């Protein structure tokens, strides 16, 4: 009888230990699944963001963002001569006129209102292989696993006799 009690006690001990190990494995497995996905960059969201940004700045006219104090001051000071330019065309015109610091400030004031803070971006304006303008917001571009680039061609006219471009504009986004 004592042997039976000891045998049952050993069986209960092993059953409890097995149940504890199985529960631990399930909890660890569910935790790994849930927490492993939250730290990965969302490739599709970054791709959509890159294309949406290039589409947006290629279609919004400068007069549509004239409520921005910086843009309003540039227009009053005569640095923006054509409010019918799109935002991207205006950056290109600043580059053509050699006003890269103004282009950088303009990009910062406008783009930071468009791009969510958890994303980083780079705007490049190129004339062939020459980089005319490079604005980067954020760090980690070199180590990011997901870089998405969207491109557009821009050109413009300053007055009746002066045209600039075509330039290639490129927005690169990462998280």
Image (tube, rainbow, N blue to C red):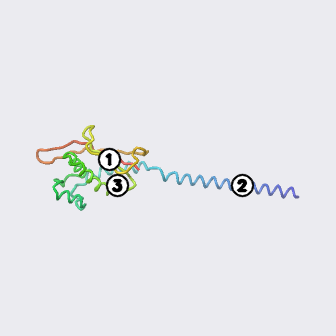
Secondary structure type for disc 2: helix
Secondary structure type for disc 1: strand
Judge left or right: residue 103 versus residue 29: left
Residue 103: percent from left, percent from top: 24, 50
Residue 35: percent from left, percent from top: 52, 54
Frontmost residue, 12 versus 158: 158
Label 2 crowd bin: few (<14), some (14–19), many (20+), radius 10 Å: few
Judge left or right: residue 2 versus residue 63: right
* Labelled disc at residue 38: none
* Labelled disc at residue 17: 2
Mark 3 vs mark 2: which is more N-terminal?
2
Mark 1 vs mark 3: which is more N-terminal?
3
The residue beneath circle 3 is: 115
Please tell me whether residue 164 is drawn above or below residue 24 in the rendered image: above
Please tell me whether residue 123 is drawn above or below residue 129 in the rendered image: below
**Which residue shows up at 76% across the image and 56% down it?**
13
The alpha-carbon separation of the residues under discs 2 and 1 comes to 57 Å
Judge left or right: residue 33 versus residue 166: right
The alpha-carbon separation of the residues under discs 3 and 2 comes to 52 Å
Judge left or right: residue 136 versus residue 101: right
Farthest residue, direction top = 129
User: Are dots 1 and 3 in contact, CB under 8 Å?
Assistant: no
The residue beneath circle 1 is: 171
Label 3 crowd bin: few (<14), some (14–19), many (20+), radius 10 Å: some
**Which residue shows up at 18% across the image and 57% down it?**
75
Mark 2 vs mark 1: which is more N-terminal?
2
Farthest residue, direction left = 160
User: Are dots 3 and 2 in contact, CB under 8 Å?
Assistant: no
Secondary structure type for disc 3: loop
């Amino acid at each position: 009888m004592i042997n039976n009690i000891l045998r049952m006690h050993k069986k209960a001990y092993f059953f409890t230990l097995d149940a504890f190990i199985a529960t631990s494995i399930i909890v660890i497995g569910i935790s790994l699944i849930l927490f492993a996905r939250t730290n990965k960059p969302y490739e599709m969201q970054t791709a959509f963001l890159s294309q949406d940004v290039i589409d947006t700045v290629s279609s919004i006219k400068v007069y549509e963002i004239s409520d921005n104090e910086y843009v309003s001051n540039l227009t009053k000071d005569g640095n923006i001569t054509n409010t019918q330019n799109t935002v991207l065309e205006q950056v290109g015109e600043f580059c053509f006129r050699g006003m890269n610091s103004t282009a950088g400030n303009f990009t910062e004031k406008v783009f930071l209102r468009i791009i969510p803070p958890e994303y980083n971006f780079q705007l490049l304006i190129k004339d062939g292989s020459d980089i005319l303008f490079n604005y980067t917001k954020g760090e980690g571009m070199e180590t990011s696993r997901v870089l998405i680039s969207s491109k557009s061609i821009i050109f413009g006219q300053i007055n009746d006799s002066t045209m600039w471009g075509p330039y290639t504009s490129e927005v690169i986004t990462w998280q």
